[in-house]
Every structure is written in C-alpha cells, then in structure tokens.
Image (cartoon, helix red, strand yellow):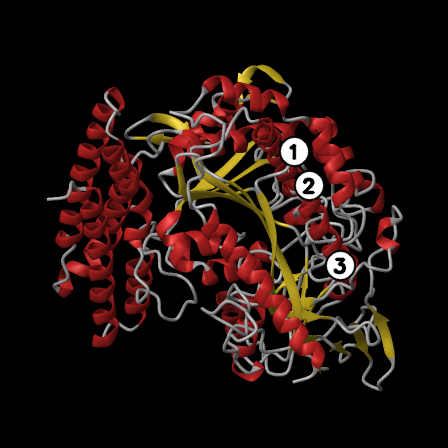
Amino acid sequence: MQWWKVTLVVVGLAALFGLGIILGHFGIPKKDDPTPPPQDLDQELLGTVMSQLDAHRIQENLRELSLKPHMATTPRDEDLVRLLLQRWQNPESGLDAAEQGVYEVLLSFPNQEQPNTVRVVSPGGAILFSARRSEENLTGEQGDPEVVQPYAAYAPAGTPQGLLVYANRGSESDYEHLKAQGVNLTGTIALTRYGGVGRGAKAVNGAKHGVAGVLVYTDPGDINDNLKLPNETFPNSWALPPSGVERGSYYEHFGDPSTPYFPSTPFAFRLENADIQGFPPIPTQPIGFEDAQQLLCNLGGSPAPAAWQGALGCQYRLGPGFLDNGQFPRDSQVNVTVHNRVELRNSSNVLGVIRGAVEPDRYVLYGNHRDSWVHGAVDPSSGTAVLLEISRVLGTLVKKGTWRPRRSVVFASWGAEEFGLIGSTEFTEEFFTKLQEWAVAYINVDIAVFANATLRAQGTPPAQSVIFSAAKQVPAPGKSTLTVYDSWLQHSNRSSPTHGVIPSLGSLGAGSDYAAFVHFLGITSMDIAYTYDRSKTSARIYPTYHTAFDTFQYVESFLDPGFISHQAVARTAANTLLRLSDSLLLPFKTSDYSETLRGFLQAAQEALGPVLTPRGISLEPLAAAVGRFEQAAAKLDQHIETLKNNPSDPLKVRMVNDQLMLLERAFLNPRAFPEKYYYSHVLWAPRTSSVPTFPGLANACEEAAKTPDDPKAWATVRKQLSIAAMAVVGAAITLEPVA
C-alpha cells in the first residue's frame, strides 16, 4: 500500500474513533460539574435563550457561510469545517467537545477540461445551436471560478444523439402517453421539466422506453409564476433568471452509493461501480429555460396535452423532430455530450456535544448539512447560520455555568448531503446501535427560510405537540400580536378529530438529512423552516434553488430582509430543542399517533376494502391492532398525567420516557421493503398509490389490481397487511405497561 494511502487510512480511523469516543464519553455522568442539574423545563431559561438569539448575528453568519461556493469536499467546504470546529471549541461560547468525522465516499463531478454540452446538429453535421455551459454573470458571484458547471450528478458519460421529443415531467405515464400517440421513443433525446417525479426517475423511466438521453429544465410556469423576461427575474425579483439551471443528484437512493448499509470507513466493503444500483442509466444534462425555449418552441409533432403546456410563450409539441418552418431543419438532431466521472473523496461531518447533567446517555440531535451546489445562501447556509447562532447561545450558558441540559445535545454539520444525504446516512450506519438505544429525537433545519410568510414543519406524529408548544411561544415576525403558531394556523391548517382546527404538520419523505433517522433508525424526527404563502405563488420551491443565483444578496433582498424570519426559525427550533433536552417527561403525545393510525385504517377500509373483501382478504386484524394501540396510548397518556403530579420516582420517569422514545422504533420492519434501501418504517416509506394509508399495503394493492389473476400479487397484499398489523401491535405493546 502506498504511503499516502496508509496516511489516509490512519487519519480516517483516528477521526472516526474520535467521534466514537465523544459519543461514548458524554454518555457518562460527570460528578464534578458545578452547574445544578435541571429538574424540569425552565420557562425562564426558554425566555432567556429566545431573547438572546440575534437576527444580526444570523445575518453575519450567512454572509460568511455563503461568501464562496462550497460544494462537498472542495477547499471552501473544508474551510467551513474548520470554522465550525473553531466556533464549537471557543472557550467562551463553545460546546463541551467538537470533533470532525471523515468518510471516504463516492461522488460525481463534471470534467472541467471537457465541459458537458447540448447541441442541435443539422442532418449534415453542422452545429446549429449550443446551450449555455454556464449561467449568466448577473451579480458577480456567477463568475466565480469555483462555480461548478450545471450537471446531473451520477449521470453516466456518453454522447447520445437523436431526434428530440418532449416528455413533460418524465414520469412513467408521460412516456406511455407519448407511445400511445404513436411517438417512437427509441434513440430519442427526451426534454423533460423538473417536478412530478424525482430527478433520476426521469432518466430511468425514459431508458425503459428506449430513450437515449435526457434533458431537464425548470419551466417558469412551475417556479416563477410565469415570469421569464430578464427584467422580471433576479436581480430584479426573486424569480429564476432565464439562464438559471438547477443542479442536483440523480442517484435514486441515499447514502454513499458504494457502501449501502456500511459506513464508508477505510475497511468497509465497497461495491464495484458497475454493481451500484440507482444511478441514471443514460446520459442526462440539465439546462436553463432560455435554452429549453429554443428547443421546445421549435419542436414539431402533435400538440402536447393542456396539462403539459408551460410558460415559455409557445405551444408545446411532442416531437419527434422540429417544425418545418422553424429555426432548425426538420430532421436536425440533438446531441448530448456528458463527461461526468465518479471518484472517491474524503467528506467530513462535524459534531459538537453538550453533555447532559442527568441523562447523558440520552441524545437530542440537531443537524443541518453544510455543503452546497454553489454559494448556497438558502440551501443550506440559512440553516447553518441558524445552527451556529443556537449553539452560540447555548454554549455561552454552558461556559458560564448557568445551564446544562438534562439530556445530552448533539449538534451536527453533515457533509455531502447534496449528493444523496451521504454524511448523515454514514453517521447513522456507523453509530446504528448507539443511536437506536440512546437517541430521543432528531431536529433538522436544512433550508431555514424558503420565504418569509409562515412556518412550515414536517415530522412524525409525536413531534406535533412539541413543535406546537414551541411555536406558541415565538412572536411571528412582523406581526406583533400573533405568534408563529397563530400565523401557521392561518396559512395551513387541518381539522383534527382530537384537537379541532390545528396547523398542518407535513410528513417526512427523503428530502433532507432526517431520512436515515426516521426511515432507517426509527427516531422521532422533524424538519422546521419558514416558507411562502401558497395562495400567492405556485412555485414548487424558492426559484433559485440549486443555481448560481442562490446568494446572500438574494436572501437579503427578497427572502428575508432584516433576517427576522431566520430569527423566528431559530427561536422555534431552539425552543423545541430545549423542550426535548430539559423536560422531565418527554413532551411526546402518543395519542397523536392514534389519530394517524385511525386515519390510515379508515382510508384502507374505504378505498381498499371493496377490492380486498371479494378475494377473502379481511382488514379486521389491522382494525383490531389499531384499536389496541388507541387503548394503550390513552392509558399511557393518563399515566403520564398522573406521573406529572408525583414525579418523585426517577425509575418510573425513565421507564415512561423509554416507552415514548422507543415508540417510533416499533414501526420498523427491515424486511417490509427489501427493494428500497434504508426504508424500514412501515408508515412512512414511499407510497406510489393515491390511497393515504399504510404504504406497503396501498402499493401492493395497486400492483395487484394491474394483474388481478396473479396469485403472487395477492400474496404480496396479504404479506403487507400482516406487516402493517404486526407493526401496530408491536407499537401498542411498547406503550403497554410491563406485565
């Protein structure tokens, strides 16, 4: 082995060993700490912390974090690793300990010497049109030499060339529609728009039908409320400029692609690149809508359906080939040349710990990723700016000796999230056992501020009551008489059978670093952000997402002037964190899960029952399981209320807290979805069916309906029904008192 490889192995092992030492060390009580241990959540402390969270400091954090592009593993990314370590090791405002954990992970990059290209080529081979290779330099930042060329991460290299077709969002049904219209997809280049299905799925679906290459663009009708002219877009408004291109990972799973279920340590088993599942099968390249306009507005063929039309100022057609009287000869082809490559790189997580005074072996985790595609002022640096301010305020209290949490608090800055949630996933793989045994909850604040209208929170049901309580104590920015909860209730609400009209708490998919915590580990998780008023915009996300226009100026000018929404997120997240770290009894309501399960059951009975009953498949076992859970949850809630009045027995408190902590784990079944990496949670795995019920059951029923005479398909339905019922029974047993 070469000397430098030996050095890398030693450094990597030392870093990972250091993280393990930190997590274990701070699970041991310290008897010489002069800080009095907290007995329960201190409301006065909550007020102190929220008053000290400073909007100006968050603003300055963001200015520094977004100063330069900081894609994963680049020199600027490593600079930010050192910045976090410096802040968390500060003698006056730092944490008890901070450590860097390094993983060697497989990433994908474009070739700087051979840029990816998109061209229209005449039948004679002449180049008639070339798409931009970089975004227009409108404010100076776009010209930074560290700005990475727009590309589709993990898309393979290749040079496909063929007639152009328009495939809408690239879903399976979109390609099927093209075939139904008589369009021969074999050897074509498919132009698709973002949204509808995941990035990678656009290429996967196209390849199934013979498509040779895929282009992806952002339609101004999906992101800009139809604005598309230069004077209507950034820097004149928050709208995406015509040259803006959304970068992103096209890998369909999460974690290091080469080490599924193994942490990417020096001696981990690695798949050969050819054996990795989930990479796009055909060359793929994103482009801006100004280039898409040149292609789409000259495309021939039949008119596209009304639902496929967009805001480029022309009628969208299906192709193949171009218009007879258009800019390009009819039989001109589109050439897509991709020179992407994959390589192993060292990527760092940074962890900071505040040791718990009473239950140091119980962790409340708070995380956000650090890497961006370009400057990343919104994604992810708005979240990192908030993370640094919360840790500064809490660290200062610890260093002064005026506060120490009941439970340990772990702050995390994850690496390589943009490539597929890699840093957080590798962490959960390495510390799987310890986290399953000791982790109370995970709080994620990735994009802290999408816009400045209202709170947007997502989470598993036990998180609902915690976030609600926190939001009720935070003033809504710019609305002196309202709380964040009040504003949230006005903008997004639902009717609850238990609570009446309440804010809508979204569910967690796999869009950020909470994914491995909830789907793989079964840890109660939540994601907190401020967002836009959906009655005033149809944007699917903030317009400059993953482009070179996501800059500090963009945030300061359009998303959050004064940074008061960032401050509101910091206050809400910090309040939530302290409730989880300091409350004597964990502030989870198990009855909120009862409501979710009852809703799932009713949806299954109404939508699936008529299909299942004629086949002799009964939902009664599932109904009985949900009933048992409801009884167990109600009894535990009553027991908790009794315990609150007489919490003198620490063993009884610990037993109840363990039941609350372990409830989410009870819904895990690692064999429920064997075809999906990391998805073990029976309630929150991806659902392709439109029926809002147990995803495994709903998906199996949908597939069986396509082949009604296949006994294996209905056997899968029965299996998924058993998996769902057993998970609910297991959760009920978790809540029932020990016999």
- In which quadrant of the rendered image does the C terminus lie? top left
Badge 1 vs badge 2, beta-carbon distance below 8 Å: yes
Q: Is residue 304 left or right of residue 629?
A: right
**1 or 3: mark nearer the eye:** 1
Rendered residue at 23%/34% (across/down) = 652
Q: Earlier in the sequence, mark 1 or mark 3?
A: 1
Amino acid type of the residue tagged 3 in the rendering: Gly
Q: Which mark is residue 288?
A: 3
Amino acid type of the residue tagged 1 in the rendering: Ser
Q: In the rendered view, would you say 347 is above or below 210? A: above
Q: In the rendered view, would you say 454 is above or below 142? A: above
Q: Quadrant of residue 609?
A: bottom left
Which percent across, then down, holds residue 355? 49, 40
Task: Indicate the secondary structure of the residue bearing disc 3.
Answer: loop
Rendered residue at 75%/53% (across/down) = 79
Task: Indicate the secondary structure of the residue bearing disc 1.
Answer: loop
